[in-house]
Image (cartoon, grey):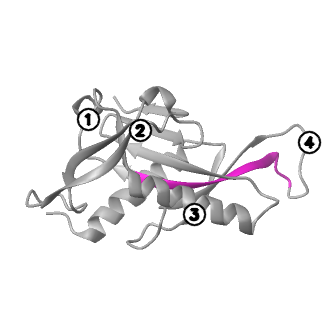
Amino acid sequence: MNTFQQHINAEGTTIYSFIEGQPSINLKEIQNDSYSRYDFEFVSGSTVPKINSDGTRFKYLLNGLCEVKTRNSNIIDYQSEGILIELNKLTAVIRETTIKQAENINLIYQPFYLSKYNDVTYLFNLMDCDLGRIQIIRCPKTSSSNGNNEYVNKACVLLSPDDAIITINHI
C-alpha cells in the first residue's frame, strides 16, 4: 500500500532522474506537494560560444513549470489511448504559467508535462501539443495504489507520444 508520502517520493525520483539525464535543463525548485498547481520548475538553456561572467557557457532560454505523473505500468497498456493528463491538472499548470509570466515579464515561461512509465518517459511542452483530444475516463479518485481506490469519471486530455519533445526509453 502506497502512502501519500511514498507517492511524493516516487514523483521526486522521477524529477531527479529526468533532470540528471538532461544537460540543458537545470532544476530550479520542487513544488511537489498536495496543494501545488505544478510539481517542479526548471530552467532550460543551451551552451553558447562565449564564456559568461560566472565562468560557464550556459545561456538560459526559458523557465518551465512542469506537472509530473509517475505510472507503475508500461506504455503499451495505454498506447492506444494516448498519454493521459487530467484536464484540471493541465489547466492548473497553464494558469500558473500565465501568472508567473505576468510577474516576470523579462523571462519566458512555458507549461510542461513529464509522464514516466516503467519503460519510457515523455516530456511535453504543452504549448506545442494538440490538446483537442478530451475524453471522460474512469480513473482512481486518488494517487494511492493499494488496490482499494474509489473510481470517478475525470475529464482527461490524451496527448500523442509524437508530440513529446523528449522521449527516454528505459528498456
Q: Earlier in the sequence, mark 4 or mark 3?
A: 4
Point out residue 160 in the picture as x, y percentages from the top left corner.
42, 30
Q: CA distance from mark 1 to mark 4?
A: 43 Å
Q: Residue at x 39, y 35 (%)?
A: 133
- Per the model, the C-alpha gap separating discs 1 and 3 is 30 Å
Q: Amino acid at mark 4?
A: Lys
The mark nearer the N terminus, 1 or 2, is 1
* Residue topped by disc 4: 50
First in sequence: mark 1 or mark 4?
Answer: 4
Give whichever of 108, 54 is nearer the camera.
108
Element type at marker 2? Answer: strand
Question: Seen in the image, is 115 located left or right of residue 118?
Answer: right
Stretch in magenta: 55-68
Q: Which mark is residue 128?
A: none
Q: Nearer the viewer, mark 4 or mark 3?
A: 3
Determine the CA span between mark 1 and mark 2. Answer: 10 Å
Q: Name the residue rendered at 82%, 45% in the picture.
A: 57
Mark with earlier residue (1, 3): 1
Q: Left or right? Give the position of 155 relative to 63.
A: left
Find disc 2 in the rendering and name its residue: 121
| Disc 2 to disc 4, C-alpha distance | 33 Å
How packed mark 1 is, by other alpha carbons closer than 10 Å (few <14, some 14-19, many 20 or more), is: few
Of the residues shown, which amino acid type is indicated by label 1? Asn
Residue matched to label 1 = 74
